Amino acid sequence: MSLTAYNKKRDFKKTAEPKSSRKKKTDEHIFVIQRHHASRLHYDFRLEMNGALKSWAVPKGPSLNPQDKRLAMEVEDHPYDYKDFEGEIPPGNYGAGYVYIWDKGTYELLDDKGNDFDRQALKEWKAGSLKVVLHGKKLKGEFALVKMKGREENTWLLIKHRDRYAKDEYNSEDYTPKRVKDKLKGTANNKAAEKKGTASKRASAPAKKKAAPAKTASKKKSGDEQMKEFYSPMLTTLVDEPFEREGWVYETKWDGYRAIANVKNGKASLYSRNRLSFDEVYKTVVNAVEKIPHNVVLDGEVVVLGTNGRSDFQALQNYKTTRKGKLTYQVFDLLHLDGHDLEDLTLLERKALLQEIVKQLKDPVVKYSAHTDKGMKLFEDAAKAGWEGIIAKNGESNYVEGARSLNWLKIKVLNRQEAIICGYTEPRGSRKKMGALILGVYEDGRLRYVGHCGGGFNHQSLKDMYERLQPYRRDTSPFSEKVKTNMPVNWVEPKLVCEVKFSEWTGEGIFRQPIFVAMRDDKPAKEVKKELPKDLNMVTGTKARTPKAAAKSAKAPASAKRKAKPSAKGAAKEGKNAAGTSERSLRLNNQSVALTNQQKIYWPKEKITKGQLIDYYLSVADHMLPYLKDRPQSLHRYPNGINGMSFYQKDLDTETIPSWLKTTPVLAESTGKEVDYLICNNTATLIYMANLGCIEINPWLSRISKPDHPDYIVIDLDPEDIAFRHVVDTANVVHEILEGYGIESFAKTSGASGMHIYIPTGAKYEYETCRLFAEFIAKEAHAKLPDLTSVVRAKSKRQKKVYIDFLQNSRGQTVAAPYSARPRPGATVSTPLQWKEVNAKLDIKNFHIGNTMQRLEKHGDLWAGMSKVKNDLRVVLKK
């Protein structure tokens, strides 16, 4: 790799770009993506190879959407030290403009053969097909760089593979701080940089513990970035469901005033999102933050805490006049520290610095707003305590001023909405001064009526509201449409904002049962819009879980739409028990199991509901439970159905789950911590799991009595873009091989796209022995079908082949249980088969929740005798 071209294009007396350099060989290889705003904006994608950086210019920036095939023009190799370059390339120089390190991390080769890394990477590059796994802060997972045939020699495509990090929509500019975007718009910072003609270098992430903030921050950038007079707070997007997701953190949603604190040279200013000063009314907070021995910009919420620790907005309102209450400033973000803007750091990096600052301050008025990775539990706690809701934040996100971001989400326990006061009705009866407030919001720039609110007032607050509205009186309605009321209306200018809580929106978009909460002097009326929760799945995006994907799904069998017949022993109704009702309760195993959202659609194409799934599990419970008993369960939850976001849950909070549920502590080898797994030994637990959104049931292969000794070996046949008939052929070959050794085996559909073959062991062998046995059989089958099968895990090596997976046989791995429904189109079921059914006529789509019970009634459980089979593996392992 030559750096001659790089050196020829640059005059290092005029640019701060690094000179030619190479890195000594190490185990890790880095990648870096630099946003380069030159004559045209582009992103430079660089991979370390052989001590230098292979480089591509990506005009539209990298994407996590596999549908985006980004053009990537290969450019000259860059020196290794270029990975740290960030700043201005002065005018008149090659590539003049601003360079910003957008992402960096390490990478590995997807098909690592264990050879010399650089040699293999260069070989793939020369072949025009380079597949890597990125471990960055923004970009994660599998990517491919593919050279385009028939185009210029340097023309490539950068493509995201479909994996757990893939998104259905992605724009790299959404993850670029506003201050960086402004660099070439004549900002003061940019002009100063042009004069200096120098570049600053970005440093490593801040230490998360013990480090002094000033010292840590000083590593971030050389040069002084001026603190602005005002900062616009980053805003949240409302979504409809709580969730947990890797890399996200969750915070309490405080019920107070959002406030930014600028502290400079020992003097502080505190202001709202619309730049109203809080300096006098919350002088206690100002005095507290002025003790911080650094120049900082803090983001947080001013609240008054009640005796229960819950923030009380009405008490905060009263504090303005009474000065009574425990006033605190709950800080959750840090935007600036000692001459360094921190908005381009990740959230977790900013919070680590913030926590240290608050810890050193030791003032009870300023509190660090802590976070957790247990979003579901925090939401449950919020509901029990009566909080307004919780906030979910992407731990890797930057701070984007003034933006309503999809990286910050809020999930409400209670329905609350800001509204503009547009008038009030005359009082009636014994009521004095006024009747109800007439409320509106802006919709497409037009003021729209959303209801009237008379609840939430007492005699004094009615009087105060009446007096406050008098200066705003007007003769005409501010609405373009006619508003119907039961009493005459006095109209006012739409300037004042209040907050109401309500039960729901009507079909006409009107508040139902609104109650006045408080005035919101911190919110400009022009910004008040109807806030409807976005679908969580549409906001976060997950692999193959979009409405578009559902529309393309194969048509499900009509019989799958029929309700499964409930028949579990011990099931008794409590109130209404139809799957068509939204809520119901069942008496199972002497326990009351509450069921929720029974009408929620889980399979949109087939219109199958959550209630119908629960009825299915009730019908097959007696046949299914023997395969679940005493086995730890890995919960795979789909709270919004098969097209919604899903997540895995292994560790249950034993303090909050029903006391009758059985759990078992298991030491997690990866963390060294105990995990409380659920044990499903009865129908009540099975239905509890289904109500959590567990469409599929995933037990361990071993039981808690012998956790290291599985009861069966599993060989998973997984087709990769190849006809299912080849899965059938492979299954029969595996069966024949096992029979040849005198080993009895059992087959079932996976319910997804392949098949599972179970080999009973009688729990006599450890996992490692079982895995070796499975590997031996898999490789023997592959030897008989080398053109149709593969035993290589890398997907690129098994295109158009059946993957014979023997790696499921390890402690903690799970496989869909017999009779488990699957989150696939058609509501398919993983169904036990007779070996004679494994033939050319076998079709996975013919086994679903609409007909499984009829099959069981006709044939019984085909695997009923499996527990009595104890194969002797020694006849194979001795070979």
Image: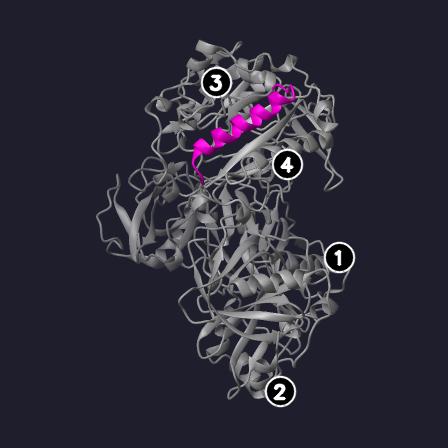
- Write down the quadrant of residue 560 in the picture: top left
Disc 3/disc 4 C-alpha distance (Å): 27 Å
Q: Which mark is residue 209?
A: 1
Q: Secondary structure at mark 1?
A: loop
| Disc with the residue nearer the chain's start (4 vs 2) | 2
CA gap between label 4 and label 2 equals 54 Å
Residue under pointer 3: 836
| Label 1, residues with CA under 10 Å away: few <14, some 14-19, many ≥20 | few
213 lies above or below 835: below
Horizontally, is 54 left or right of 27 in the view?
left
Measured as percent of width and height from the top left, residue 31 is found at: 61, 64
* Circle nearer the N terminus (2, 3): 2
Which coloring applies here? one colour
Circle 2 residue: 12
Marks 3 and 4, the one that precedes in the sequence? 4
Q: Quadrant of the N terminus?
A: bottom right
Which of pointers 3 and 1 lies earlier in the amino acid sequence?
Answer: 1
Q: Is residue 764 magenta?
A: no
In the displayed structure, would residue 182 be above or below residue 805? below
Q: Which residues are magenta?
A: 722-744
The answer to which of 732 and 22 lies nearer the viewer is 732
What amino acid does circle 4 point to? Leu
The nearer-to-camera label among 2 and 1 is 2
Number of numbered labels in the structure image = 4
Q: Would you name the residue on which mark 4 appears?
A: 807
